[in-house]
């Protein structure tokens, strides 16, 4: 089972790397922010898998903190840092 | 391997498939609104399946409860952020994609 | 077993390469917003790297501060930068030609070279086969008052480090406050979704802060992690439009800000007088003393981080008179 957990964790990490493309590409600020939201969810899954693979339950607390704070950055973006005019054009 | 191991493995792999679908959606969908679907639906289902798969193996009810709490928190964050971002994007005049 | 080791190696390699790549992109990116987003992603990967290095305490701190709070703080600072830029344009200050202040690009290099040389010297002068101090920590853990070695080091064996860190945090806030008052900005109503989110999430954040504080005695957790989660609750409430009551903004806020370092200092003086040594607790009372210190530190760290996010001294009653 340990091998399955680690394979899946690696798979999710590669998923995360693929999602980086969207952060770099944009085109809008919202797209970049959303991609980090995906990273948060994926990171939670990776941490839970690692916690199980290494038999190290405290790692679940790291995942818990990630899950708790997943919304804070995105809300700060929507409420404060989103410019009124989008420079990037949103059609590909 | 016992029965719960097989169940757990099946759920975990199914979860990973949903994560892959979410990433594909993030990369391939045409505009910010459709990408919101990919992120907040596929990924949350993927995490849910993984949480159930790990909860089958959990050492205690409390640990399973913590896993469930993590999933609920991610669901809450995903749903709220999707709504806020979509609202903000409409307000800023980003037009939804039309075929 | 070989497959497991191979998998761990692959995982760590991708993680390390990803970290380096993200760091480079974040530094090289000309657009500040993109750099912030990359930095948030960097924080997420860094937390995973700490997990991979079997340092869950640091991973917890990185998750709470790096991935959660720093992003919000940087985004708020970016918004402040943008608004100050537009204000200058509205004020219509003519740009003086020829007198433009240009930062010479070689200046940071000159400043940083000695630092790099010094760090390099320190690294090279380390003994090649260092054993570390973990054996001493393990030997003295019984008198430390807590069973988590990290908490024992931070709050007991090397308590003055933590004391100074608390003071550094306070100094950072003083720096921000000396730059001016909180920006008076009109905000849209938070709307039903954000309102509900903050009402649901803030109590859970406070509860988890308490959990991390308590669990720090025997497992990964502690004051800094709990304080950051508490600070995140403050940030979320501020984003949802909550403001500190003017009556609480003067003395009560300042008391909360200095509670951590104040109680720490008082404890340091007390132990210096009673035990003859700085922050040397009597072993029998060490556990409860650490809990008291950590509770005060958690409150102070949380309030300081939320105040940093506010970006200036909140208006109080005296200002209205």
Image (tube, grey):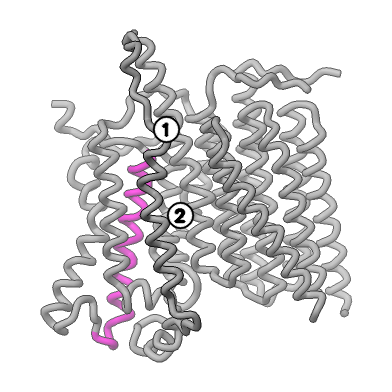
Residue range of the region highlighted in magenta in the rendering: C282-309
Q: State which mark lies toward you, 2 or 1.
A: 2
Q: Nearer the viewer, residue C121 or C277?
A: C121
State whether residue C236 is above or below residue C67.
above
In x, y percent, where is residue B95? Answer: 71, 17
Which disc, if any, is residue B70? none
Decide: few, some or many residues near mark 2? Use Cα within 10 Å; few <14, some 14-19, many ≥20.
many
Query: Residue C25 sits in which quadrant?
Result: top right
Labels 2, 1: one chain: yes
Residue at the spot 78% in from the left edge and 50% down from the top edge: B19
* Above or below A83: residue C114: below
Q: Which residue is mark 2?
A: C229
> Closer to the N terminus: mark 2 or mark 1?
2
In the rendered image, which quarter is residue B57 located in? bottom right
- Secondary structure beneath disc 2? helix
Residue at x-position 42% and y-position 70%: C214
C9 horizontally vs C295: left or right: right
B3 in magenta = no
Q: CA distance from mark 2 to mark 1?
A: 19 Å
Q: Which residue: 54% across, 69% down?
A: C56
Q: Chain of mark 2?
A: C
For the N terminus of chain A, the image quarter is: bottom right
Q: Are marks 2 and 1 in contact (CB under 8 Å)?
A: no
Residue C83 shows up from this direction: yes
Q: Which residue is mark 1?
A: C241
The answer to whether residue C91 of the structure is visible from this angle is: no
């Amino acid at each position: 089972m340990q091998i399955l957990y680690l394979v899946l964790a690696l798979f999710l990490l590669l998923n995360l790397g693929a999602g980086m493309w969207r952060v770099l590409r944009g085109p809008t600020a919202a797209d970049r922010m959303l991609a980090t939201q995906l990273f948060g969810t994926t990171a939670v899954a990776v941490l839970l898998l690692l916690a199980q693979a290494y038999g190290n339950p405290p790692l679940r607390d790291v995942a818990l903190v990630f899950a708790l704070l997943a919304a804070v950055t995105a809300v700060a973006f929507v409420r404060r840092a989103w410019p009124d005019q989008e420079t990037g054009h949103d059609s590909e | 391997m016992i029965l719960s191991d097989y169940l757990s493995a099946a759920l975990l792999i199914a979860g990973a498939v949903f994560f892959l679908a979410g990433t594909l959606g993030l990369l391939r969908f045409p505009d910010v609104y459709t990408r919101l679907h990919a992120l907040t639906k596929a990924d949350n289902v993927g995490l849910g399946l993984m949480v159930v798969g790990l909860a089958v193996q959990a050492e205690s009810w409390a640990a399973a409860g913590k896993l469930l709490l993590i999933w609920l928190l991610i669901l809450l964050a995903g749903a709220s952020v999707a709504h806020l971002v979509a609202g903000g994007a409409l307000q800023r005049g980003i037009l939804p994609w039309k075929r | 077993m070989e497959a497991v080791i191979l998998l761990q190696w692959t995982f760590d390699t991708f993680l390390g390469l990803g970290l380096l790549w993200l760091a480079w992109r974040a530094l090289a990116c000309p657009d500040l917003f993109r750099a912030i987003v990359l930095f948030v992603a960097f924080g997420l990967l860094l937390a995973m790297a700490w997990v991979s290095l079997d340092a869950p305490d640091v991973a917890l701190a990185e998750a709470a501060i790096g991935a959660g709070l720093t992003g919000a703080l940087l985004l708020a600072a970016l918004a402040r930068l943008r608004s100050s830029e537009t204000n200058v344009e509205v004020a219509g200050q003519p740009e003086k030609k020829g007198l433009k202040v240009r930062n010479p690009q070689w200046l940071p290099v000159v400043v940083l070279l000695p630092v790099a040389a010094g760090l390099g010297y320190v690294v090279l002068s380390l003994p090649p086969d260092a054993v570390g101090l973990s054996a001493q920590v393990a030997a003295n853990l019984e008198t430390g008052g807590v069973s988590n070695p990290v908490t024992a080091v931070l709050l007991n064996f090397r308590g003055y480090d933590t004391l100074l860190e608390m003071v550094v945090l306070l100094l950072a806030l003083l720096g921000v406050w000396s730059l001016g008052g909180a920006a008076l900005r009109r905000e849209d109503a938070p709307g039903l979704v954000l309102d509900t989110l903050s009402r649901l999430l803030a109590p859970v954040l406070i509860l988890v802060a308490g959990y991390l504080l308590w669990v720090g005695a025997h497992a990964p957790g502690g004051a800094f992690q709990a304080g950051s989660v508490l600070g995140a609750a403050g940030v979320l409430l501020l984003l949802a439009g909550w403001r500190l009551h003017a009556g609480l903004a003067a003395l009560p806020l300042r008391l909360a800000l200095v509670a951590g370092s104040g109680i720490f200092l008082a404890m340091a003086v007390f132990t210096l007088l009673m035990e003859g040594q700085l922050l040397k607790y009597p072993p029998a009372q060490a556990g409860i003393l650490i809990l008291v210190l950590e509770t005060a530190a958690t409150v102070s760290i949380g309030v300081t981080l939320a105040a940093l996010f506010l970006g200036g001294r909140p208006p109080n009653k005296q200002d209205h008179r």
